[in-house]
């Protein structure tokens, strides 16, 4: 007897459980991506604002009086030097002009702030009329510099450099005369799960230095100094200075209470199952473990998405996963076949092992879905490894495209994937915006250079519901291509990458309702 296709379309949602709190490296990293005010609307409902006033300095000088010292700064302007607000040479508003004709003293400006024992993000723009004059930027703790960035000239040319603890100067990049550079420094005095404090240095949006050692170990940072050199004459311009607490939120979902509430939210919206990105390692396994220990786990089913972490110890992880195949809350399709997704490409041997393990456990043959970023690559992988169907993790967009454009592109992809591979699980992307990971790069995505323009406009709840309804309709008008009759939402909780339906802090505080889930609940499943 052939496997029976469900009359009701199953709706799954991807879970990416990195929201484990700031005491872990990965948790701290994603906290930082959502700390800027413009991204806090994405915070999950269980997040805490740990530093309400994260902005310590934010000054563009346009409102300051021309010819006066910059407000809020202590300046030092000995004989033959000046530190004063002036028109930007390029005509773009005002800046601070440090003119140093002394040759024996320096001009400087210092801003103090409440001592901070957390990571700080410091940004400024500067240019020298003649580059390489040993202008300096110093992040300070008490009387000691912890980060020291300068300009210089040596036999190879004019350079931006930073000082190492041994006193040596290391090149950041070449620089040119009369050219503005935008610098950003992230300095962490006590990084979680790491042995030593560090600093990252960015120039014009590109990370040039990663995790360099601080000059001294300091419990707090308390001031920023920008200055000329005491033995050289120079003209230095400074603009758009900011100092912010890097990590001012804590999104810690790793508790039983949070997981139980998430299950209630998902069940009320008609989410049939969560597809967990299957991390075997702690702390990323905590989400799945808390789900499995929940008294409410039967209210929402689950299945696995196997990625490189799973494949790296495949046999051991398969044994653990297969032990759940027969459980009532492991998602089945087609008369009892356990549903499994592969984000990373398995081998044919691994697919064969998974099928054999299911047989050994006395459960039907798994329904194996491989994911690919293009229809041809997904179809080829399905054929090569002997999978049953294809899907896609998410669909991106760029340059602030309308969500309707993203949805239209993805709708066309359902047919493309079906043509390439036959059987398909349509993906429903709820949003895409990688800009937080451009501002605060994550260690697992070393090439973040394109993220500044990798974003679409935010979807309304109604637009998400319409797109999901389209996927359900497509599945039920293409039954030969969708025997499993399931669609997969990206995502439950990819907050910093731009795709989520989990309730947010802003939704609950402002509306008292999980608006995206309410909209999803209204979508018919037949």
Image: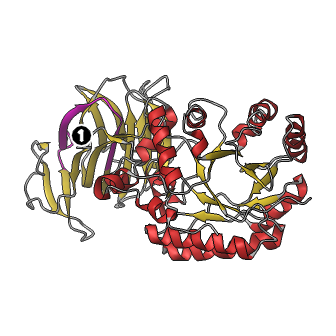
- Where is the N terminus found, in terms of image quarters? bottom right
Within 10 angstroms of label 1, few (less than 14), some, or many (20 or more) residues?
some
Q: Is residue 135 above or below residue 9?
A: above
Secondary structure under badge 1?
strand
The picture quadrant where one finds residue 515 is: bottom left
- In x, y percent, where is residue 102? 17, 45
Residue at 41% x, 57% y is 176
Residue at 70% x, 70% y is 475
Taking depth in this image into account, of 272 and 310 the one nearest to the observer is 272
Q: Is residue 493 above or below residue 391?
A: above
- In x, y percent, where is residue 221? 28, 31
**Magenta residues, start to end:** 100-123
Q: Is residue 461 visible?
A: yes
Does residue 64 appear left or right of residue 234 in this picture? left
The picture quadrant where one finds residue 377 is: bottom right
Circle 1 residue: 225
Residue 522 lies in magenta, yes or no? no
Q: Is residue 410 visible?
A: no
Residue at 89% x, 34% y is 360
Does residue 300 appear left or right of residue 495 in this picture? right
Taking depth in this image into account, of 419 and 201 the one nearest to the observer is 419
């Amino acid at each position: 007897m052939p496997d029976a296709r469900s009359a009701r379309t199953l709706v799954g949602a991807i879970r990416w459980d990195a929201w484990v709190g700031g005491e872990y490296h990965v948790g701290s990293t994603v906290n930082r991506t959502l700390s800027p005010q413009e991204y806090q609307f994405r915070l999950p409902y269980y997040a805490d604002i740990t530093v309400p006033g994260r902005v310590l300095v934010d000054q563009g000088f346009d409102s300051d009086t021309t010819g006066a010292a910059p407000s809020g700064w202590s300046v030092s302007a000995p004989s033959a030097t000046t530190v004063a607000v002036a028109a930007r040479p390029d005509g773009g508003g005002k800046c601070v002009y440090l003119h140093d004709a002394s040759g024996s003293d320096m001009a400087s400006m210092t801003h103090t702030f409440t001592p901070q024992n957390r990571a700080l993000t410091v940004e400024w723009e500067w240019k020298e009329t003649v580059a390489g004059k040993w202008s300096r930027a110093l992040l300070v703790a008490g009387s000691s510099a912890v980060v020291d960035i300068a300009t210089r000239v040596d036999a190879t040319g004019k350079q931006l450099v930073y000082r190492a603890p041994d006193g040596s100067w290391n090149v950041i990049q070449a620089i040119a005369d009369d050219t503005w550079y935008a610098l950003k420094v992230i300095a962490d005095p006590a990084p979680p799960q790491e042995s030593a404090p560090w600093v990252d240095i960015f120039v014009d949006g590109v990370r040039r230095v990663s995790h360099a050692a601080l000059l001294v170990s300091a419990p707090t940072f308390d001031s920023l100094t920008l200055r000329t050199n005491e033995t050289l004459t120079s003209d230095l311009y400074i603009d758009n200075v900011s100092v912010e607490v890097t990590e001012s939120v804590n999104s810690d979902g790793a508790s039983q209470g949070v997981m139980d509430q998430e299950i209630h939210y998902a069940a009320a919206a008609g989410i049939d199952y969560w597809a967990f990105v299957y991390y075997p390692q702690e702390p990323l396994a905590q989400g799945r473990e808390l789900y499995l220990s929940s008294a409410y786990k039967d209210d929402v089913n689950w299945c696995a998405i196997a990625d490189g972490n799973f494949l790296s110890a495949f046999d051991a992880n398969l044994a653990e996963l297969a032990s759940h195949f027969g459980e009532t809350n492991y998602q089945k399709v087609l008369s009892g076949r356990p549903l499994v997704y592969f984000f990373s490409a398995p081998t044919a041997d691994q697919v064969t092992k998974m099928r054999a393990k299911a047989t050994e456990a006395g459960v039907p043959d798994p329904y194996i879905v491989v994911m690919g970023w293009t229809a041809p690559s997904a179809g080829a992988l399905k054929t090569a490894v002997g999978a049953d169907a294809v899907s896609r993790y998410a669909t991106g967009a760029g340059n602030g495209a309308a969500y309707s454009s993203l949805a239209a592109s993805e709708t066309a992809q359902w047919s493309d994937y079906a043509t390439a591979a036959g059987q398909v699980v349509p993906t429903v992307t709820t949003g895409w915006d990688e800009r937080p990971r451009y501002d605060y790069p994550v260690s697992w995505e070393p090439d973040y250079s394109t993220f500044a323009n990798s974003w679409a406009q935010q979807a309304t709840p109604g637009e998400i519901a319409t797109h999901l309804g389209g996927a359900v309709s497509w599945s039920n008008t293409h039954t030969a291509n969708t025997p499993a009759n399931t669609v997969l939402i990206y995502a439950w909780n990819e907050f910093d990458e731009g795709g989520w339906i989990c309730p947010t802090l802003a939704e609950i505080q402002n509306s008292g309702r999980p608006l995206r889930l309410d909209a999803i609940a209204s979508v018919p499943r037949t």
